[in-house]
Amino acid sequence: MSYHRDPLAPAIHTAHEWLRAIADGLATDDRAFAHRVLRAWLHTVRDRISINASAHLSAQLPEMLRGIFFEDWVPAHVPVSHDVPSFLDQFAHEAGVTHDEAVALAGSVTETLTGLFSPGQLDHVFVLLPEDLRRILVGAELAGPLAASFAGRREPSRFDELDTRLRALSEAVAVLVRGLENPLEGVSDGTARVSAAQEAHRILLVEGLIEPVAPTTDRSHTR
């Protein structure tokens, strides 16, 4: 009689179910290929949305896929450029496909994930992305609730921008409070304050709430 039960079995099973759905959407039996394409989608989308949006999106993923989502993620480097060429470069490189194939594959993965995520989840993630990038992500021929939700959708309004900036400001304040009130064990108060200030500064910089500070030249020792 076995006294062991694999605690990871449910998580692995769910990840396989999602991967099977992706493979079915791509019309392939090659699970390794489906895995590469899904990984490319997760990383290219992750790198173009805010930290808060990444947190909400990742919470919808099975545990195993959440690990893939955050693989090599550097919060200080996001969001990266929203232009289509850089998106296709990254997607094609990670999936091992051409740019033309990347366009079709991205739309297919989006269509499948729309049915796996909670209703409206991808709608909220994509709404603040530029229209040309949204078109790549939803697929030019994509039919279904997500494509319909973007048909004739207005561009982000000043209210949308204000809401995004307000959330970024709230996040920056929360980072400062956590750093000042709950410093990591073994870290001095001074170091904790500097680290919290740097993290808050990065958040505000990413969202365009502050301008980068140009380096200055110290002329105190010049004649």
Image (cartoon, rainbow, N blue to C red):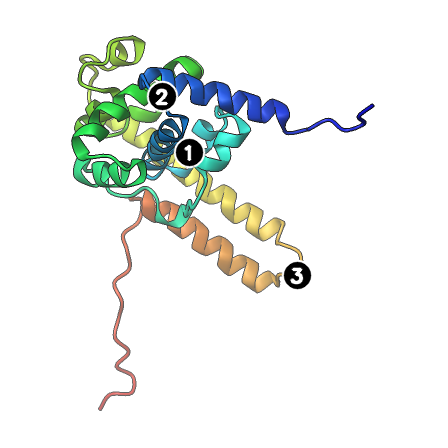
Question: Compared to 97, does 178 lie above or below?
Answer: below
Residue 175 left/right relative to 153? right
Residue in the picture at 30% in, 35% down: 95
| Secondary element at tag 1 | helix
In the rendered structure, find residue 105 and report the number of the disc placed on it: none
Q: In this view, does 189 lie to the left or right of 147?
A: right
Q: Which amino acid does label 2 sit on?
A: Leu
Distance between mark 3 and mark 2 Cα atoms: 40 Å
At a point 62% along the width and 63% down the height, the residue shown is 188
Q: How far apart are marks 1 and 3 (CA)?
A: 29 Å
Label 3 SS:
loop
Q: Quadrant of residue 139?
A: top left
Q: Which mark is residue 122?
A: 2
Where is 34 relative to 114, above or below? below
Q: Can residue 113 be seen in this view?
A: no
Tell me, for residue 186, which label it has, or none. Answer: 3
Chain-order first, disc 2 or disc 1: 1
Q: Where is residue 116 in the image (x, y as percent from the top left)?
A: 43, 16
User: In this view of the protein, which residue sits in the foreground, 171 or 48?
Assistant: 48
Give the quadrant of residue 152: top left
Q: Label 2's element?
A: helix
Q: Where is residue 187 in the image (x, y as percent from the top left)?
A: 62, 61
Residue count near mark 3 (Cα–Cα under 10 Å), binned few <14, some 14–19, many ≥20: few
Residue 71 placed where, x, y %? 45, 42
The residue that mark 1 highlights is 54
- Three-letter code, disc 1: Ser
Please identify the residue farthest to the right as the structure is shown.
1
For this view, does 63 lie left or right of residue 212?
right
